[in-house]
Amino acid sequence: MTGAHGSSPRERLPGGPDPELVERERELAVISRLVRSTAAGDPALVVFEGPVGIGKTSLLNALLDQAHDLRLRVVHTRAGQMGHRLPLSTAHALLAGLSADGSAGLPLSVSFAVLVELHEVVRSAAMAGPLVIAVDDVEEADAASLRFLAHTARRMTGLPVLLALARCSGAHVAALNEVAALPQCQVLRPRPLTGSGIGLLTRRLVGTETDSAFQESCLAATNGNPMMVTRLLTGLREEELPLTAAHFASLDEDDVPAFRPRALRLLHRQPEATVQAARSLAVLGDGAAPETCARLAHLDSTAFVGSVLVLTSLGFVTSNDDGTWSFVHALLRNAVLGDMSEEELTSAHGRAARLLHDSGSSAADVAEHLCRAATVPEPWARAVLREAAREAMLRAAPDRAVELLRPCVPEGSEDACDPALLVELGVAETRVDPRASIRHLTSALERASLPALRSAALGALTEALTRLGQVARAMALLSRYRSDATAAGVGSAQLMEAQMLIAASANRAAYAELLETVTFDLSLSGESVGERALLAARAVSCVTRLDRVAEAVAAARTATARGSSTTDAVPFPCAAGLTFLYADLPHEAERVYRQLLEDSDPLTDESRPSLLALSAEAHHRLGALDVALRATAAALRNVAVSRAAAHQAQPLAVRLHTLLDRGDLAEASRLEAEIPDARDDAWQWNEVLCARGRLHLAKNDPERALAHLEECGRREAQWRRISPAVSPWWYWAGLTRLALGDRRAALALAEEAVGRARAAHLPCALGTGLELWAEAVGDDERPPLLEEAEQVLAGTEAALIRARVRVARGKLLHRLGYNKAAREVLRQGWEEAYAVGSRSLHKAAHRALLATGARPRRPVSRGLPALTHSETQVARLAADGRTNAWIAERLFVTQRTVEVHLTSVYRKLGLSGRRELRDALAASDTGTAAQGT
């Protein structure tokens, strides 16, 4: 396209938003000065330099507009158009309008004489009046025209000529470099948009006002490149998507399909090396080593860095502090990946895997690409995949381990595979795909000869069969193994049976069948790993069914006392701890889980979330509400509540109960709304039903509460979890019945719970049952029931339940007219509720105390009784010689919190340091023991 004086006064070069949209105050001021200087008779030379889309054409158009306004003669063209590659074609497009007859015949070859002649055309035109010569995309001009432009630039002295050239950064053309280096040349590099500029551009393009958060998000995703911003906003407008930061943060490649082709058109306008660099970055991922990216792109380091700088200026990538690069937004990376064919992608991932492996990258990083290479792995690749799968199993990610191992065992090749590989795959599949696990483990057993390998395969196979409910087949395998096993193999058989019992907890039908099939001998010595595992697995099954509870507790104590985390697999001491929980011994359970957590690796131990959940349950039963909340938060870290599975249901239920005990109804309601309905009949969902029922009761919706609670009770009975210490569903169901006016049903629940708790010596369940019984009868019958409940609970560490019973008895005494006794009991309950952090119970006790005429000012502030549960925990750990850092990690708090707790402990106890603290706690423990004898 060519323009000259006399043509349309506002003829512009195509492309780019209006200059006032892109915050060009500095650049526009320079342009205005240059145009005015030329109008006054002085020469000027300006080069606009920058990446595609940064606004070079906008500035060139602004220059043309000002030149037209001052009635300067203008000639301009875009060198990148068709027909501009012939010798002097760009010069012809410019000068045809300046020649005498309007159609100068320019020679095809260039000599100095020709250049002089061409310059004479320019000089003659300039003598007739100020002249503007503008060329966009000048790096695309033919070599002869570039020589002409450089020649003219060097000889502008005394001529009223403004020569304006626009070129892409990174285009190394000798003639243009020479022009840019001239002393009189002004090089303008347009700056990226700022957030406010994006807001202005959004208002002009979309007609919508946006806030600074959206503008900053858009800026981060485009590096402020005006063309990229324009294309992104246009895509958002076409898809009718909301222009908010929150929505922008959630965008993926499918959310703005209209943006992808626009971004790719911009990318493909760049040299092939830039496209290849973008693809290598997209395949390897953000933060990949530049050397590896360059090799994947088949570029040398210099060419790769240059290409990435172009991508950076385009707004595709951004540099990191460590010298690597990352895509500014997933939309762009996914656009680049989507531009590659399936064959190109798989080939690139295969090459990436080899490059990473050769450079010493981790197995997990290499395996990520091997999984996408879609080829049968070579021996080195299989070794990498197996190593990465083992790491995944340590991180409690069996599904990832299966994904890594399955390419190593193509369908139909099982008989030719290494049996050890089949066992690794089968073990990983046990909880992910039990049917495939059975197939692979069975195939491995047919060919495995090593005893250790056969034992591992048999253990996993019996577990998989049990999970699928094929108990008879699993028992047959176990029996055959027992008959074939040597004396040394007896422990393995015991371990397999224990694994079956644990696995059956995931399948109600299998569990019921096992209860009728296996024996529950609790007299084993616990000397071997197999015996301890079997004792723990049998003990928890017995205690939930109220079968020989005292023997089960003794068996669990044997298993924990004679084992350790270095000898026994974590699920079995976990089962022993669960036995203590269900036997109303939460303090013993807490010690078990504390030790297991201390011995586990926070980053790699697959059992840690389960340990945290069980620890939270123990702390909740002890009344340590703050610790329970922190433990559940740690157990649920990085968990999407709306997609929670059975093993995450338990910490969710504990968290709900704890929030309700604290009196935080709003937060409990918010959490409950996110929890999905039970996805299966796993027993862990039962407690979610219980907590939901309790929440609806607190929200004065007893009908809905009762539906959840009775469903929980029904499911518990199906699982044979009949002990009243297993779940408090019956207590909350009783209170719900009372809210509905059905005292008889509430009394029946209380009587059944009390009877079972007395027979099994379950003090917490007994105290709770007596409390419910008292609520279901008249005031005249209540005192002895609540007195007994308080006495029973006095010998336990269930601080919250004890405080609740005391508040209930204090209210009753006040109603019966015993104000002095009521004040004494209520004050105890009031202080205990404060200590455990139950705000709702503390407020209720406070109101009851005021009703008796008491004027409570604050809970006890001196002595051991004044310590909160959290302060007591910190004090005991500090007295044991633990550092503040260790205590903070153990209790999931900051070191500052530990320091605050210790300062409070020292103040309340009148102590000066840890040595005195050790003596004070030792004296307290001695006094407590003496009172108990």
Image (cartoon, grey):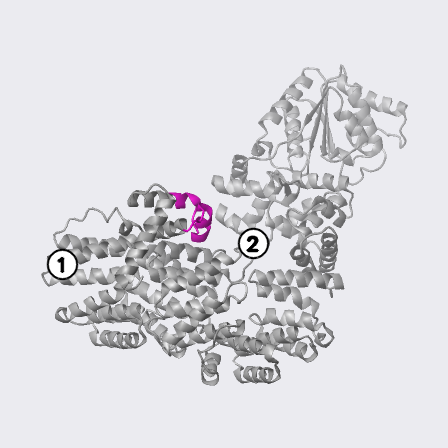
Q: Quadrant of residue 411?
A: bottom right
Specify whether residue 839 is painted magenta.
Answer: no
Q: Residues within 10 Å of mark 2 (few under 14, many from 20)?
A: some
Magenta part mainly helix, strand or loop? helix
13 lies above or below 493: above
Q: Amino acid type of disc 2?
A: Asp
Looking at the rendering, the stretch of residues picked out in magenta corresponds to: 880-899
For the point 33% across and 51% down, the residue is 921
The residue pinned by badge 2 equals 255
Going from the N terminus, do you reach mark 2 or mark 1 first? Answer: 2
Tag of residue 853: none
* Percent of width and height locating residue 901: 36, 46
User: Which part of the image, by quadrant, shows the N terminus?
Assistant: top right
User: Which part of the image, by quadrant, shows the C terminus?
Assistant: bottom left
**Is residue 879 left or right of 324 when viewed as pictured?**
left
Query: Considering depth in this image, is 846 or 582 the residue closer to the camera?
Result: 582
* Percent of width and height locating residue 48: 69, 30
The residue pinned by badge 1 equals 821
